[in-house]
Image: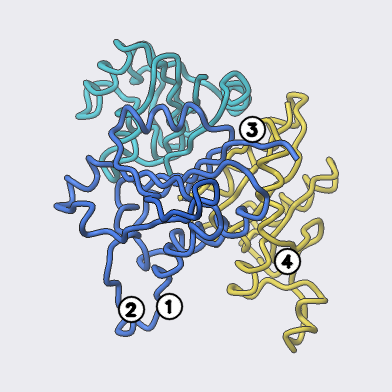
Amino acid sequence: MTEKTFVYLNRKAPYGSVYALESLEVVLIGAAFEQNVKLIFIDDGVYQLTKGQKTDGIGMKNFSPTFSALGDYDVNQIYVDEQSLKDRGLTMDDLQALTYEDEDDDWAEKNSMHLVNREQIAELIGDADVLLNF
Amino acid sequence: MSTLHTVNKSPFERNSLDTCLTVAATDSTVLMYEDGVAGALQNTSASSAISDAMGQGVKFAVLGEDLDARGLSSDRVMDGISVVDYAGFVQLAADHDNVQSWL
Amino acid sequence: MKFSIQVNEGPYTHQAADTAYQFTKAALENGHEIFRVFFYHDGVNNGTMYGVPPQDDRNVQSLWSELAEQHELDLVVCVAAAQRRGIMDEDESKRHGKGASNIAPGFRISGLGQLIEAGIESDRLMVFGD
């Protein structure tokens, strides 16, 4: 099968609308197609990755633990926009630390998360074959 | 690689156009449609950011049908922004290597 | 050129479905191929046959069905999104013990893999939403 670079650009906060959850569902299904997958979190999308989400009070399912499983699906190129964090008074310490086990390096645990600037995001978009926007 | 960026929200309601302009590279095109056409008009608080991007080689287009629907004459569109129809929208998508929709 | 179209919003609340329809129609009129139209999120509501808008309004669901018939379009409604929102074909309806199906002519229900496949097989994927 042709390998293409799929970039998922996530710009929306979780729970207020369904886009974040249903985007994650596409990523999980898409992982089976063995494409080159990259996730960008920018603007309110960075709120999807915050630690300590508790949704009991709003009666909705907390889907944030699913992000930590992405590494097992070989989804390990995750880019977080530095400016969006800064604008929201957040740092990487406020976000889940997503990792994967590198099968080419004796299953060493490695970081999936990369802090990037707008220039790097421009490059990620430019290099994409398919851009999925939620 | 060149990208067609599409913006469908008014810059006075959401930050889609703002964010788009920070990553739109030279030789890419930004198409404004639906409520996004408001960003293409002269003398708005969005105009200077668009002029700056034009200066860096970003091209701009706006969907004429959406201007018409909102009673906004194409005379009010900033110089340098081309007015296209749906066929022109399709052509822009075909002419670039990929499409980024700032939803 | 081969296009695929993703529609993330239902008809009437947002313009997204109308724009997606106009884009699809213009692409076909200009000699392009539409590999697939994939309906996701509230976009699955484009695929119900029970919409009855006032007579002086456009019927978005019927417009899709008519375009599909003219051009043999592949209109795919995401099964997971459709189940959440009550869009069913006969098989789905029986499986879930519901009284009737409501999927509009020309639409079919399938999985998210169809969206990924559309991304792989098409030259351009267009996303319309809110």
- Depth check: give the residue in front, B84 or A23: A23
Question: In the rendered image, is residue B3 in sight?
Answer: yes
Q: Is residue A24 above or below residue A102?
A: below
Mark 4 → mark 1, Cα distance in angstroms: 30 Å
Letter of the chain that mark 4 sits on in the rendering:
C
Q: Are marks 3 and 1 on the same chain?
A: no
Q: Which mark is residue C124?
A: 3
Mark 4 → mark 3, Cα distance in angstroms: 29 Å
- Residue B54 location (% of width, % of height): 33, 14
Q: Is residue C18 above or below residue A109?
A: above
Q: Residue furthest left?
A: A89
Task: Tell me if label 1 and label 2 are in contact, CB under 8 Å.
Answer: yes
Q: Secondary structure at mark 4?
A: loop
What color is chain C drawn in? yellow
Q: Marks 3 and 1: which is nearer the front? A: 1
Q: Residue furthest front?
A: A106
Letter of the chain that mark 3 sits on in the rendering:
C
The amino acid at mark 3 is Arg
Q: Which mark is residue A61?
A: 1
Task: Tell me if label 2 and label 3 are in contact, CB under 8 Å.
Answer: no
What color is chain A drawn in? blue
- Residue under label 4, please give it: C49
Residue under the point 50% across and 57% down = A23
Left or right of C127? Residue B67 is: left
What color is chain B drawn in? cyan
Residue density around tag 2, few if under 14, some if 14–19, many if 20 or more, within 10 Å: few
Where on the picture, by quarter, is residue B18? top left
Mark 2 → mark 4, Cα distance in angstroms: 35 Å
- Depth check: give the residue in front, C10 or B74: C10
Left or right of A107? Residue B26 is: left
